[in-house]
Each structure stands twice: as C-alpha cells, then as structure tokens.
C-alpha cells in the first residue's frame, strides 16, 4: 500500500443507511452500519486525500482527518453531497440509500387504531446517478449490495450509471459485520477479492481506484 496514492485529491463519500421519517417517532431504514464507508474514508485519508464523509445515522466515531456531514434522509444526503461537490475529484457512494420515502411525513405521532393502514411511498432521487451524470462529474465509484446474481446486477448498475468502478457485495456477507467479500467491476472486467476485514478491503479499493485515476489522467 503506497501511502500517498490520493495526495492532493478531494474525495466525497456517502456511508451508512438513510432514515425516512413516517412521523416524529417512526421511520424506514436498513441495517447498514457504516463500517464499509468509514473504512474507505480512513483509507482515503491515509492515501493523502481530503475527505468529506456524508453519513447517515451510524454509531461510529468520525475518522480522524475527515470532515463528517451528518444527515438522516436521502434528500438531506443528496443536498449535502451536492454542496460538498465543488472541486471534488472522486465521489464514492457506499451508503445504503432508501429507494423510497413516505409520500407524506406526519407532523404528529400517528395514533394506533384497529383498522388496516397502508403507507404511500415515493421514489428518492438516485444521488450517485445524479452526480455521475453531471457535465463535470468527478470520478464516480458505486457500490451494489445484492442478495443473488451479484455479477449481473452489479455490472448492470455500473453500466446504467456509467461508472468507471463499482464494488459488488452480497448482503449476507457485507451488511453490518466487520468483514466482507467484494468483487470490483471496471471496464477491464471483474476482480474478486478474498474475504477480509473491511479496513483491508478499503485499502485494495483505494489502490485500484488510484490506478484508474492515474490511467485516466495519463490518457
Ligand atoms: O455499512 P455496512 O454495514 O458496512 O455495509 C456496507 C454495505 C453493504 C451497505 C455497502 O458495502 C454497500 O453495498 N453499499 C451499497 C448498498 C446498495 O445496495 O446500494 P444500491 O444497490 O441501492 O445502490 C447502488 C449505488 O447507488 C450505491 O453506490 C448507492 O450508494 C447509490 N445510490 C442508491 C440509491 C440512491 N437513491 N442514491 C444512491 O446514491
């Protein structure tokens, strides 16, 4: 691991889950712990980058040297990412962003009753797709957590969002724990990595992305 592979680069990352409020006491979220995103933030800092970490609600300390912007909902995450973007060289979407939010968030606690209730949902904006489509887009790295057919879905997401690099993992392997099994997908193909602690995998991802960045700068 070369320590200064990202010297002089500004990196914006998203990490953790989002929380989509139903009312003041309830919401929709998921079990992302933030560990993968925070490990990647630390690896980017070790590689010499300036790091802004836009984080959903997690119970992790701020990585030393990172600027953390805490958010709850996908809409807040999107606003924080867009605000952090000027001058950014690399955007990495590690967050498990809720695809939907309640169409309406009640101002007061919804009271219990005996009748069935349904919850109307509306799609959230796709932050990564939006950033990747900008005319002056930074180098964008996506993640994909799947429960099956990882190669097909991960490579599909990479192509749909026109990403130079995507990290695929299975939810059973990657969500919540300290270790993960990942496959990197880029224009050259798939690059599987053996199961390892997230901190170690984060260093591999940084090395891979720094090589792609250097190749892009040289072309
Ligand atoms: O936090 P941990 O417990 O360590 O777990 C890590 C992880 C499993 C959450 C992580 O490794 C991971 O896979 N993150 C992506 C989760 C996911 O399923 O993303 P997705 O397939 O819904 O989205 C694909 C990509 O688009 C991701 O980079 C995501 O951040 C981004 N996205 C998705 C939806 C949305 N509205 N906005 C986005 O930016």
Image: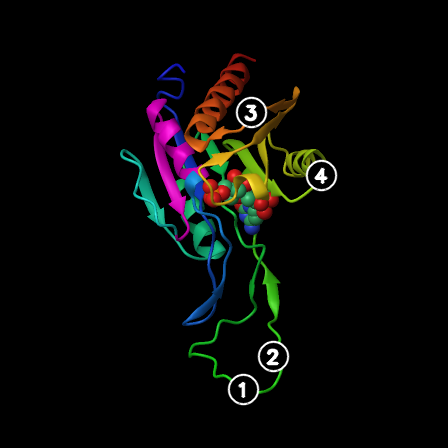
In the structure shown, which secondary structural element does the residue marked by tag 4 occupy? loop
Say few, some or many: other residues with alpha carbon within 10 Å of mark 1 (under 14 / 14 to 19 / 20 or more): few
Check residue 7 for magenta coloring: no
Q: Which residue has dot 1 on it?
A: 113
Q: Secondary structure at mark 2?
A: loop
Give the residue number, with chain letter if any, for mark 2.
117
- Residue designated by label 4: 149
Mark 2 or 4: in front is 4
Q: Which residues are magenta?
A: 36-57
Q: CA distance from mark 1 to mark 4?
A: 41 Å
Whole-angstrom CA distance, mark 1 to mark 3, is 51 Å
Residue 87 visible in this rendered orientation of the protein:
no
Left or right of 29 in this view: 68: left
Q: Are marks 1 and 2 in contact (CB under 8 Å)?
A: yes
Q: Position of residue 90 (x, y in %)?
A: 46, 30
Q: Which residue is mark 3?
A: 194
Mark 1 or 3, nearer chain start: 1
Name which residue lies at 61% across and 24% down: 192
> Residue 13 location in percent, x, y?
43, 38
Whole-Å distance between the Cαs marked 3 and 2? Answer: 45 Å
Mark 2 neighbour density, 10 Å: few (under 14) some (14–19) many (20 or more): few
Whether residue 18 is visible to the viewer of this picture, yes or no, is yes
Separation of residues labelled 4 and 3 (CA atoms): 18 Å
Looking at marks 3 and 2 on the same chain, the residue that comes earlier in the sequence is marked by 2
* Marks 1 and 4 in Cβ contact (< 8 Å): no
Nearer to us in this view, 43 or 102 = 43
Where on the picture, by quarter, is residue 47?
top left
Residue 16 picture location, percent across and down: 45, 47
> Which quarter of the figure is the N terminus placed in?
top left
- List the single residue furthest toward the top: 218
């Amino acid at each position: 691991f070369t320590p200064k592979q990202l010297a002089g680069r500004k990196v914006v990352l998203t990490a953790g889950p989002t929380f989509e409020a139903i009312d003041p006491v309830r919401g929709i979220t998921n079990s992302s712990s933030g560990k993968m995103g925070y490990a990647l933030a630390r690896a980017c800092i070790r590689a010499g980058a300036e790091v802004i970490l836009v984080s959903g609600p997690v119970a992790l300390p701020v990585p030393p040297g990172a600027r953390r912007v805490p958010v709850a909902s996908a809409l807040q995450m999107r606003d924080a990412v867009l605000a952090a973007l000027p001058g950014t060289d690399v955007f990495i979407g590690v967050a498990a962003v809720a695809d939907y939010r309640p169409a309406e968030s009640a101002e007061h606690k919804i009271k219990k009753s005996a009748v069935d209730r349904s919850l109307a949902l509306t799609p959230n904006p796709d932050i990564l797709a939006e950033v990747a489509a900008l005319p002056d887009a930074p180098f964008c790295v996506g993640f994909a957590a799947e429960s099956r057919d990882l190669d097909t879905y991960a490579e599909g997401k990479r192509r749909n969002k026109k990403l130079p690099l995507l990290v695929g993992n299975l939810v059973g392997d990657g969500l919540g724990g300290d270790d993960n099994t990942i496959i990197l997908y880029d224009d050259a193909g798939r690059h599987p990595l053996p199961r390892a602690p997230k901190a170690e995998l984060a260093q591999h991802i940084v090395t891979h992305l720094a090589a792609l960045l250097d190749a892009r700068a040289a072309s």
